Image (spheres, rainbow, N blue to C red):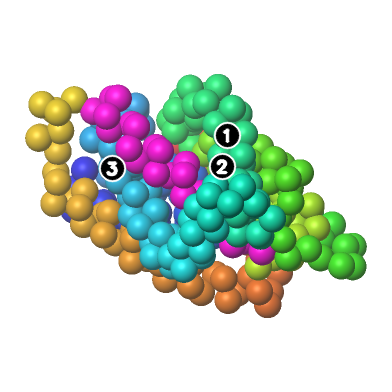
Amino acid sequence: MNFIQAILMGIVQGLSEFLPISSSAHLVFTSNFYKVFKGIEIVQQSNEEVFFDIMVHLGTLIAVLIFFRKDIAKICVAMWQAVKTKDWSSHEAKLGLYIILGTFVTLVLALPLNEVAEKLVYSPAIVGMLLFVTGFVLLLSEHMSKKVAAKKDRVDLKTSVLIGLAQGLAALPGFSRSGWTIATGLFSGLDRTTAARYSFLLSIPIILGASMVYPIVKIDIHEAVTYNWHAIIAGTFVSAISGYLCIKYFMKFVSKFSLGFFGYYCIIAGVVTAVFFSLN
């Protein structure tokens, strides 16, 4: 892991984590494109590269925590009040419960897929095909959403479960987490702004868990001291900055425009990368 590669991947992670284009797919593509053009064989990632992926995800977690700090504070206060009064009727308290439920559903589906997901990192052509599927799902969700006359601006129990399942499927690189969760929200009748907001809030426990658990379980402290920490810290910082800016402008975009653009992008990028890596 060198400094330039770290900065590049930090930018890619920050932009693609919240856009519905699969950050995991773009990290796979960026890393493997870099290896192809440098004449490096595409082989299993080193522990340092895996750790770096976790750290740039931590950077985007910082971005979403800062951007949605007021929403998070309201949810936490509402849940605390609900625990004390045993009254869970407020929207914010229910939303907190739905996020917990959605996270549980995500883990039930994502954990069995984890081993498959780790192997796909070394198969960028297959990841490209999965990105193609994401594009199709985005276009279909926009088409179905137009048929719903009265769109919901609040998440309910059923929707939280369905979006949790979608987030679990997105453990596979190429299946965009934000893309599949927002699309599922649209399928369920949510308006785009509500679907995007809930998608970002739902990402917090998963990214936080991955950022904390993986280093504790799998990182060898003696090996970690040999990592290029300047590059890792720089990449994490850049992913936080680019992630914050991405959320800010994407929320404005999604409130006014269709996600069709991202759907077509995923289809084209998926086909191009699948073909490219099939030939290399």
Q: Nearer the viewer, mark 3 or mark 2?
A: 2
Residue 23: percent from the left, percent from the top?
A: 47, 50
Measuring 76% from the left and 44% from the top, which residue is drawn there?
Answer: 158
Measuring 66% from the left and 64% from the top, which residue is drawn there?
Answer: 194
Q: Is residue 55 left or right of residue 228?
A: right
Distance from Cα at disc 1 to Cα at disc 2: 6 Å
Identify the residue under disc 1: 104
Q: What is the crowding at mark 1: few (fewer than 14 residues within 10 Å), some, or many (at least 20)?
A: some
Q: What is the crowding at mark 3: few (fewer than 14 residues within 10 Å), some, or many (at least 20)?
A: many
Residue placed most toward the observer, 231 or 161: 161
Please say whether residue 44 is visible from this viewpoint.
yes
Tell me the amino acid under the disc marked 3: Phe
Q: What is the number of the mark on residue 52?
A: 3
Identify the residue under disc 2: 100
Q: Is residue 155 left or right of residue 71?
A: right
Q: What is the crowding at mark 2: few (fewer than 14 residues within 10 Å), some, or many (at least 20)?
A: some
Asked if the residue under mark 2 is in contact with the one under mark 1, i.e. CB atoms within 8 Å, the reply is yes
Tell me the amino acid under the disc marked 1: Phe
